[in-house]
Image (tube, rainbow, N blue to C red):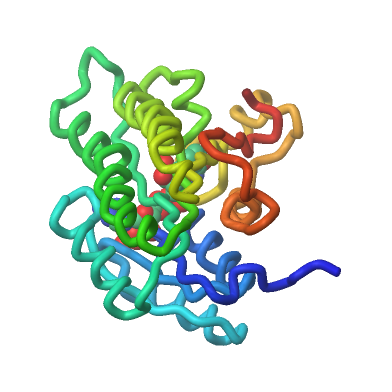
């Protein structure tokens, strides 16, 4: 018999879950039984709609604002979730942005903004949950990287550097935290249809994808659910799971 709600005693914090992939992850973890903390930076209404959708399906959720590229806000977010829920079992570091441009012309603020959120934000949240997870004697951390972090991409030096950094951070924290019962894994999506990719030439990029279609946020959410679930993924740590239709 399979357990349809393997996360029913868990609280999961999903950064950047007002839209796109984070939203799908929030819905998926709530369907698995977790109480979900829906984090957002600016889209309060969209975050409230995610909470409402989860509650409509019989799940548990609440939203918390916080810009996780800012150290103090990332810490306040984790502390706010701990205060309200009393525990944190799953952290999904999903929040991310792009500021694309060719290297020669890339402005330093565009480099910095991407590193600050896509890499440092992952570090701030991961560090903040480590102590409570050690106290709880277990936890699951899933970092959303990108296949661009594995293969590079012209026009995305900042994004690729941050996402490659997330892979190094994932592998290192997995080694540090394994003995504490905390697993740390990464999911590397290919092209997924969200606001982030809405201006890309979908038809042109399709030729690169062996499966012949773009990914949906739900495809990524399924992989995150697997990595967050006990005992299915209990012995997996430090891995990068690609969800890319065979692209890389
Ligand atoms: P998206 O549709 O643009 O959504 C981004 C989410 O991040 C929103 O919920 C946004 O919240 C939140 N966010 C932005 N800045 C934030 C900040 N400073 N603090 C907290 N939250 C913040 O992006 P997506 O496509 O779902 O991407 C989600 C993750 O997947 C990112 O890490 C991205 O790099 C990665 N990824 C995406 C693709 C793809 O093809 N889409 C491929 C590979 C990897 P607000 O609504 O409040 O702004």
87 left or right of 124 in image: right
In which quarter of the view is residue 192 placed? top right
Across and down, in percent, residue 87 comes to 38, 71
Is residue 147 rendered to the left or right of residue 230?
A: left
Q: Looking at this view, is 199 or 57 the one in front?
A: 57
Residue at coordinates 31% horizontally, 67% vertically from top-left? 43
Asked if residue 190 is positioned above or below residue 228 in the image, the reply reads: above
Above or below 81: residue 156: above
Q: How many marks?
A: 0
The residue most toward the right is 1
Residue 195 seen anywhere in this rendered image of the structure: no
Closest to the observer, 109 or 59? 59
Q: Is residue 116 visible?
A: yes
Identified at 55% across, 39% down, the residue is: 237
- Which residue appears farthest toward the top when viewing the image? 104
Q: Is residue 200 above or below residue 56?
A: above
Query: Which residue shows up at 36% across the image and 51% down it?
Result: 95
Rendered position, 109 above or below 4: above
Taking the image as shown, residue 93 lies to the left or right of residue 53, namely: left
Residue 8 at what x, y percent from top left? 59, 75
Residue 217 position, x and y percent, is: 58, 53
| Res. 214 image quadrant | top right
Q: Is the C terminus in the top left, top right, bottom left or bottom right quadrant?
A: top right
Residue at image x 34%, y 38%? 98
From the top left corner, tell me how far across and down residue 41 is, in percent: 27, 61
> The N terminus appears in which quarter of the rendering?
bottom right
- Relative to the observer, which residue lies in front, 204 or 42? 42
């Amino acid at each position: 018999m399979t357990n349809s709600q393997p996360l029913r005693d868990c609280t999961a914090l999903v950064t950047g879950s007002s839209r796109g992939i984070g939203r799908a992850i929030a819905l998926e973890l709530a369907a698995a039984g977790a109480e979900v903390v829906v984090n957002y930076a600016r889209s309060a209404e969209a975050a409230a709609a995610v909470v409402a959708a989860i509650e409509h399906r019989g799940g548990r959720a609440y939203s918390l604002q916080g810009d996780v590229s800012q150290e103090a806000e990332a810490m306040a977010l984790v502390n706010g979730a701990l205060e309200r829920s009393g525990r944190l079992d799953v952290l999904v570091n999903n929040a991310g942005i792009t500021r694309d441009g060719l290297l020669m012309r890339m402005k330093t603020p565009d480099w910095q903004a991407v590193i600050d959120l896509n890499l440092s934000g992952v570090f701030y949240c991961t560090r903040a949950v480590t102590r409570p997870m050690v106290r709880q004697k277990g936890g699951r951390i899933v970092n959303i990287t990108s296949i661009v972090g594995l293969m590079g991409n012209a026009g995305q030096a900042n994004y690729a550097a941050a996402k490659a950094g997330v892979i190094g951070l994932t592998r290192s924290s997995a080694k540090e935290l394994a003995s504490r019962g905390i697993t740390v894994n990464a999911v590397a999506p290919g092209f997924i249809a969200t606001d982030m990719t809405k201006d890309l030439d979908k038809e042109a990029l399709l030729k690169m994808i062996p499966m012949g279609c773009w990914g949906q946020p739900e495809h990524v959410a399924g992989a995150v659910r697997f990595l967050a679930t006990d005992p299915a993924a209990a012995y997996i740590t430090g891995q990068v799971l690609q969800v890319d239709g065979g692209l890389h």
